Amino acid sequence: MMTETEAINLARDYAEQHRTGWSESDVRIQSIERKGKQCLVVHSATADLNGRHWMEFETTTPLKFYIDTDSGQCFGHEYGNRGLIPGR
C-alpha cells in the first residue's frame, strides 16, 4: 500500500514535470474509486500564497493529481473542475 508521503512526492514530481504549479501549504489526500480501481487524489493549488506580501497575491486554481495505487503512477491531473488531463 502506498503511503501518503509517497503519494505527495509522486504528485509533486508530476507537477514539476508538467509545470502545473504546486502549493505546499494546503496539500490533502483523498482515497477514491475510479473505473473500478482504487486511486489516491492529492489536492494542491497552482501557487503557494503563504509568506507573500499582499501586493504579490495572485489568483490560484485548485489542482488534483490522480495516482493509481496499484502501479504507483500519477496518471493525470485536473485544474479546478475542468476534467482529467491525462499525463504525457
Image (cartoon, rainbow, N blue to C red):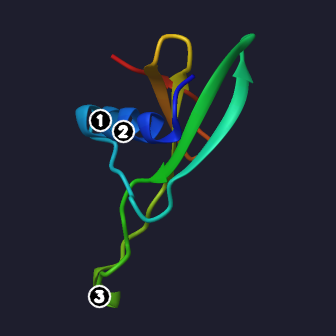
Going from N to C along the chain, the mark reached first, 1 or 3, is: 1
Position of 86 compared to 19: left or right? right
Q: Quadrant of residue 53?
A: bottom left
Residue at the disc numbered 3: 53
- Residue depicted at x 66% and y 41%: 30
- SS for dot 2: helix
- SS for dot 3: loop
Marks 1/3: CA–CA distance: 27 Å
Marks 3/2: CA–CA distance: 28 Å
Q: Quadrant of residue 81?
A: top right
Which residue, as the protein is rendered here, is positioned at the far bottom? 54
Going from N to C along the chain, the mark reached first, 3 or 2, is: 2
Q: Residues within 10 Å of mark 1 (few under 14, many from 20)?
A: some
Q: Residue 69: where, in percent of width, then height?
A: 56, 19
Residue at the disc numbered 2: 9
Residue at the disc numbered 1: 13
Q: Are marks 3 and 2 in contact (CB under 8 Å)?
A: no
